Amino acid sequence: MMDFLAHIKKDLSGQSIAVQTVSQHCLNTAKYAAQALKPVHLSAAGYLAGLVHDAGKCTATFQNYMINQIGQKGSVNHTFAGVRLLLERYFSTDAGDFSGVVSELLALASGGHHGLFDCVDERQKNGFQYRLAKEDICYEEAEENFFRFCAGQEELDQRFRVALEELTPALEHICSMTGDEASDERYEQETAFFSGLLSRLLLSAVIEGDRRDTAEFVNGTQFPAPPRGEALERLWSDLLTKTEEKLNALPSKTPVDQARRKISNQCRQAAEQPGGVFRLHVPTGGGKTLSSLRFALAHARRHRKQRIIFTSPLLSILEQNAAVIRGCIQNDSLILEHHSNLVRTEENSQQLDEQELLTETWESPIIITTLVQLLNTLFSGKTTAIRRFHALCGSVIVIDEVQTVPGKMLSLFSLAVNFLSEICGATIVLCSATQPCTEQIEHPIHSPIPEIVPHDPVIWEVFRRTDIQSIGSMPLEQVSEFALKTLGSADSLLIVCNKKSQAEHLYSLLKGGDFALFSLSAAMCVAHRREALDKLLSALEQRGQKTICVSTQVIEAGVDISFACVIRLSAGMDSVIQAAGRCNRSGEAGPGVLAPVYLVQCQNESLAKLPDIQRGQGATQELITEFSVHPERYHNTLDSDEAVGHYYRALYRREPRGHHDYSLKDRPSLFSLLSLNGYCTQDQPYFFRQAFRLAGSLFQVFDENTTDVVVPYGQGEQLIQELCGEQAGRDPGYLRSLLEAAKPYTVSLYQYQIDRLNAEHGLIPLQGGALGLNGHYHAETGFSMGESDLEFLWR
């Protein structure tokens, strides 16, 4: 045998039409992994981990499995060999430098390219020792053939020495990242956590190199190279010029216009500062999207950043922000909008699921995505999410409505922000009108965090347009009566509920009135919500047209819409203030007039499954009680900085000990699993002890995993049919275009909903592993489990 095969390309009849050798694949993977880590000067480490990742394929057993189909899919081990090669050759506990830690880092990156593994699992089993002692993997044969066909021993040793030189400064920096005031335990915890993120970064590069080279071999085409160097600098400069031309053309006559321009100019000036973590704390309606875009473009040009990433907590905000950004950039080829996971992949530690070749990568200069996708990139165990991690390096990351990061993961988020800014060279902008007090938690973002726009009471007063009033408690039925009474003196009304069931019930109670009635919720696909918002905006513009919108929280943060009055069912003060931002947004009530925002405690509200909202309500009530006694302490308004600060302190007091560490029932916290690992109770010979696989499988941004499903709304019905067709099954390019087109026609469903729909034949399997909804979609309110009178696509 002249060489060993890594991949075989077959035609539709199953005949082999092209082969790729292990040496070709490993060298290509190494090259792409090195390229991915170039922004953080870890190319040699990425190259070495990529080079050895498929060493285990250099055996007769694996060749028989692949060529002659001997053995079940994924049954032949090929990922252990690279781990063993690196540890046997380079691991040492008494080297006097970081060589032992570096060998473990490289082993984790090489051995995890088809799925994370636990360094120490729940049963105290050591993942490194298990891979070193595993029999029947033909390791000696794999090692000999790897040195013969892929890389010689001297080359490997030299590459390890260079990788050690590269990683040593990063490891030294990690050791200094926890402040002097920290306890020994906190220092050890955070050092281990940061080191785990470093291993994830290296693994990300290996997965990127492996999947990219595999996709190029399978498809027979090269991925287009993103702009780099001088070309990227010119791009940022051109885009900044376009954006500033657009900003200069905006009116500047009113005090609001002038305040927005001042905020924008301050963002432009702040962009010259060195990278790090910044706060963009501006009032609702202050032009945050355009100002943050201007900062990001100017900062990217000044400091040669690789890409700009915008995240939004809700699709409704993402859609709006994306429209603003696209209007400035005027070139959709530069933008990737990533907010859904239509392609479902299956993790296998020894086998690539070819569906992974259809998943999104973040290689575009500008990424517009959701907070969920960002958090999954940081912590999810899925290789499709891990793959994106390297794209955060050398980037500007704008996190809109940062207060929506779930409280249970504030420690993970804050430490990840520290790692991204200090190790990955990223600049992070935390945007919100209600900035959370991260300095109050045990594992905070490193302070001080500079304000891009220093607080100016004059500017904030310009944007003060509402008066938040607590009006006590009432049952949901009485809320509808109060809404009708309120509409008597207001042309338009927004009602924001905590639960979809509340919104549906209020909508049904209000139907049939002499006014335009709208519904908005996450049960509606993006295209449906977009059309509903367009109709709602049109109704709001018609004089004499009374309008009510009943919505869940999808409307309350960042959606550019304005009502004469708002009713908000009691929630956290951050949510209340965001809902108030949809009221009298442009001062249409008149100069100096404050429009009412009514805060209602809903009687008999069942929030047992929504403890975060419960705690938020309690903290809000504490603030209201204190405000009623000493309003002057809060400048006589519930949305002042002092009021928001009081609210967050009250909220954090209500949260159980360890809550911010992502506590788990009957397990160590997720923070523990990703740092010192509470399951590790015995002395271990290795530095890394984290339960990476377990933590990745347990991580969920929200309480239940969801699946994106294409719905039969508008063009979605035709796309479902096309995704069932033969062409989608045989043409990867066509399939990818259909999946891209289907994104606006998806809703996210919980697993219990998926199970019930499967039992009722309510789901249609589509090409690429996607799913289509068969019925169960209402023209007014979107997805409904109870909807059964719609015509099904297939019976």
Image (cartoon, helix red, strand yellow):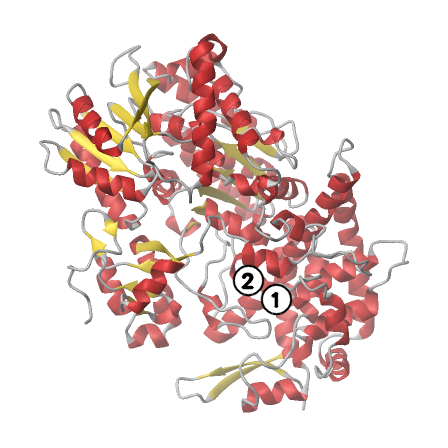
In which quadrant of the rendered image does the C terminus lie?
bottom left
Amino acid type, residue under disc 2 in the picture: Thr
Q: Is residue 138 or residue 307 the one in the foreground?
A: 138
Is the residue 413 above or below the residue 255 in the image? below
Q: Residues within 10 Å of mark 1 (few under 14, many from 20)?
A: many
Q: Residue 62 lies in what quarter of the image?
A: bottom right
Residue at image point 61% right, 50% down: 670
Label annotation for residue 550: none
Is the residue 403 above or below the residue 163 in the image? above
Residue at image point 69% right, 76% down: 55
Amino acid type, residue under disc 1 in the picture: His
Label annotation for residue 113: 1
Q: Is residue 598 or residue 581 the one in the foreground?
A: 598
| SS for dot 2 | helix
Image location of residue 458, percent across then percent down: 44, 11
Image location of residue 147, percent across then percent down: 76, 78
Q: Residue 273 lies in what quarter of the image?
A: top right
Observer able to see residue 426: no
| SS for dot 1 | loop
Name of the residue lying farthest toward the front: 604
What residue is disc 2 on? Answer: 383
Q: Is residue 106 left or right of residue 685?
A: left
Instruction: Tell how many labels.
Output: 2
Image location of residue 478, percent across then percent down: 22, 29
Say whether marks 2 and 1 touch (CB < 8 Å): yes
In which quadrant of the rendered image does the N terminus lie?
bottom right
Choose the circle earlier in sequence order: 2 or 1. Answer: 1
